[in-house]
Amino acid sequence: MTDPVLDVRGISKSFGGLKASDAIDLDLRPGEIHALIGPNGAGKSTLIAQIAGGLAPDSGAVHFAGRDVTALSTAARARLGLARTFQISMLAMEYTVLQNAMLGALGHRGGVFRFVRSVMRDHDLVARAEAALEQVGLQDFRAFRTAELSHGQRRQLEVAVALTLDPKAFVMDEPMAGLGAEGSQQLVGVLDRLRQQAPILLVEHDMDAVFALADRISVLVYGRIIASGTVEDIRNDPEVRRAYLGE
Ligand code: ADP
Ligand code: MG
């Protein structure tokens, strides 16, 4: 089997007496979408924060791209190619769609805003931004102000911004949240194509999206992974049905 891109080993995190992460093992392999599901308060966002950086585990380790990144900041992990999206919108609403994609690519180089004007003439940067927009299906909106985009299109643009960094893995916390049926469907299409470029660890409540996309599903309940397997495995697991699917 190929080595995982992302490997979480024995992560534990307590808040006072509450074990939000309880000895969690989880990995992400090339080409896959690994969905993490579980009820509210199960500890999904806490786990994502420890993987992406920003929250230090009490014990355990996170390995990414063959390195132990447990002690690294979010920014340092991002520079190694770990892209986290949908936490806070990073988009500049008054800028065009293309400019936002270019600013994303600029961040990769450690550039600063005062260099924006000169870098705007950088053809390589333009080309990378345009390729990313095309990948998420926003090529016809490149000249639109970002404020004019629908909620769903902004999510797609956030994916494009992340893509300009040429990530090795994506970590996404509830990307479908707040999207209508049409927006969700479009984003499902984008994520489905994205997995070839970089695998995705996907926290998502929308079970239609999870069942449509996931190669593997892990179920988190009270800080513990209670089951892990294919869509079929998870759908037929009696403990999962009881604990999470409400049967
Ligand atoms: P999920 O994303 O699965 O809904 P969270 O990871 O947000 O769950 O939360 C897991 C548990 O940890 C919840 O009981 C939540 O109240 C608690 N929790 C999360 N962050 C903190 C924090 N910074 N301080 C104290 N408790 C927290
Ligand atoms: Mg959450």
Image: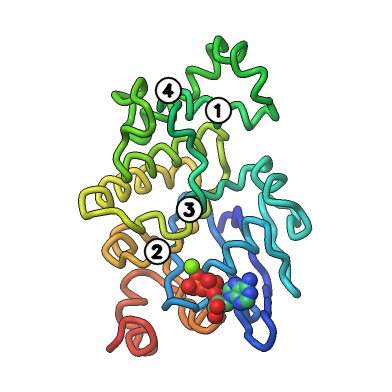
User: Taking 180 as reference, is 50 above or below it?
Assistant: below
- Kindly identify the residue that appears in the image at 68 percent across and 43 percent down: 80
Instruction: Name which of mark 1 and mark 4 comes first in the sequence.
Output: 1
Which residue lies under the disc numbered 2?
204
- Kindly identify the residue that appears in the image at 70 percent across and 30 percent down: 110
Q: Quadrant of residue 4?
A: bottom right
Q: Position of residue 48 (x, y in %)?
A: 57, 63
Q: Is residue 24 visible?
A: no
Label 4 element class? helix
Identified by mark 3, the residue type is: Ile
Q: Nearer the viewer, mark 1 or mark 4?
A: 1
Instruction: Name which of mark 2 and mark 1 comes first in the sequence.
Output: 1
Work out whether residue 113 or residue 232 is closer to the camera in this orientation and state it. Answer: 113
Q: Position of residue 74 (x, y in %)?
A: 68, 50
Instruction: Name which of mark 2 and mark 4 comes first in the sequence.
Output: 4
Q: Nearer the viewer, mark 2 or mark 1?
A: 1
Label 1 element class? helix
Q: Position of residue 228 (x, y in %)?
A: 46, 75
Label 2 element class? loop
Which residue lies under the disc numbered 1?
103
Which residue lies under the disc numbered 4?
130
**In the image, farthest residue toward the left:** 182
Which residue lies under the disc numbered 3?
200
Work out whether residue 217 or residue 143 is closer to the camera in this orientation and state it. Answer: 143
**Is there CB contact under 8 Å for labels 2 and 4?**
no
Q: Residues within 10 Å of mark 4 (few under 14, many from 20)?
A: many
**Is there CB contact under 8 Å for labels 1 and 3?**
no
How far apart marks 1 and 4 lie (CA) works out to 12 Å
